[in-house]
Amino acid sequence: MKTKYNFICLGLCLFFLIISNIDLRAQSLDVSGESRTRGYFSHGIGMIPPKNIDAATFIEQRTRLNFDFKRNKLQFYLGLEDTRLWGQEGNPSLDMDMNLGVYQAFVNYQFANKFSVQFGRQLIDYNNERLFTKGNWTDWGNSFDMAVFHYFNKNDNVKIDIGMGASASDETAYNTIFEKDVAKYLGYMYYDNFFFDKKLELAVFSIFNGLQGGEKKDNKIITTDAKTIYANALVGPYVRFNEGNLQLEGEFYYEFGKTQTGRDLSATFYAFSASYNVVDSLIFTLGYERNSGTDWSRNDSKDRSTAFRNYYGEGNEYLGYLCYFVDGASTNEAGVQDAYCDIQYSPLPKFWVNPVLHFFFTAQDYLKPGLKVK
C-alpha cells in the first residue's frame, strides 16, 4: 500500500513539473476539493435484521481533491478520492493510504469543431443515471476506465457518444483474468436530441457487455473461466417532456444475450413518472417501474433468465435507499415492481425534506425451498 501512496505522490509532482514548463498562454488550472462526512445509524441496510440485534453506529468521511488543467483543445484531469471510517485503521501511521485511490484520471482532446475523444478513468452518467451513474451517494464514487468519442452539435442539440473499454485484474502473459461480475469488455452508444423548443428530449441507449465466464456461489458470481466470454446487450429509449410546471418521464430497455453463468437472457425494464411543481419549493411525483424477473417454476429457468440486471446504473436511489432491492436480479431473480409517491419540499436554500412512499412487489412468484411465495 505504501507503493501505491508513493506512486500517487510521484504522479502529482510530475504533473506540476510538466505544467510549470508549458507556455502559460491560453491555459488554465483549476483545483477543487470536496469533503463529505456523515454518521450512520444502521439497523439492517441491505438485509432484514435478526431479532435481538443491536444497531450499528459509525462515521464515514469521503475526501476528494481534483486538478483540472486545460490548454487550447487539450485537457488533463486528475481526481483523488479517499474514503474511510473514523478509527478504521487504528494507528494512523500504519497503512495510511489503504483507502486512497484515483477517482478520475483522463485526457480529453478536441480534434475537430464538434468532435473530441476522452480516454482514461472518467465519470459516465446520462439523463437520470438509470443505466450509468457517478454514484455520488455511495461511499466510493463510480468511474469507468474507457475511451469515449464525443460528437456534439450545439445548433441542432444533437449529442452522440461512443465508448469502449477492456479491463483486467492484473498483468499476465496469457489468459487475461478479470475477477469482477461486471464487464471485462464494455462498449456503448448514446444518442440524445431535443425537439419542440427543448420541451421534448429523446435519448437512445445501446450497451454491450463481454462477461468472463463464472458460476454462482452464495448468491455471488465467481469468475472461473478466463477463456469463455459471455456477451449480452441492452437497447432502448429514454423520453422526457417538460411543459410549464409539469414533467413527464419514461423509459424502456430490453436486455438480451447470455448471463455470466451462460444462461440465455431475455429481460425488460420500463418506468414512467409524472412530476408537478406546485410552487418553487414543493414538487409532487407519482411513478411506477418494473424490473422483469424469472419464473422459477418453469422447466427452462435453469437455462434461461428473464431477470433484468442493472450493471452500472442507479438502483437504490429509485428503490428506497435501503438496498433491499436494486434490480430484477436482487430478489433471487424474482424481479421488482415499485409504485411510489415522492414529495420534495425545500423551505430553505440547500435544505430539503423528501418523504417517499413505496409499494413493492415482485414481478414473478418467489420460490423459497420449492414453495411459491407471492
Image (cartoon, rainbow, N blue to C red):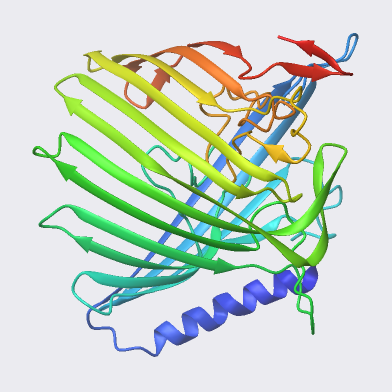
Residue at (61, 13) in percent of width and height: 361
Query: Is 28 on the left or on the right of 157, as rendered?
Result: right
At which x and y percent is residue 205?
40, 49
Q: Nearer the viewer, residue 64 or 248?
A: 248
At which x and y percent is residue 231?
62, 57
* Residue 197 seen anywhere in this rendered image of the structure: yes
Q: Is residue 64 above or below residue 334?
A: below
Query: Is 55 on the left or on the right of 265, as rendered?
Result: right
Q: Nearer the viewer, residue 211 or 360?
A: 211
Query: Is 194 on the left or on the right of 58, as rendered?
Result: left
At which x and y percent is residue 17?
48, 85
Q: Is residue 28 above or below residue 58?
A: below
Residue at (26, 56) in percent of width and height: 159
Residue at (35, 29) in percent of width and height: 250
Picture quadrant where residue 310 is located = top right
Q: Is residue 275 above or below residue 178?
A: above
Picture quadrant where residue 70 is located = bottom left
Quadrant where the image shows the C terminus: top right
Residue at (56, 80) in percent of width and height: 13
* Residue 43 seen anywhere in this rendered image of the structure: no
Q: Is residue 173 above or below residue 159?
A: below
Number of numbered discs overlaid on the protein picture? 0
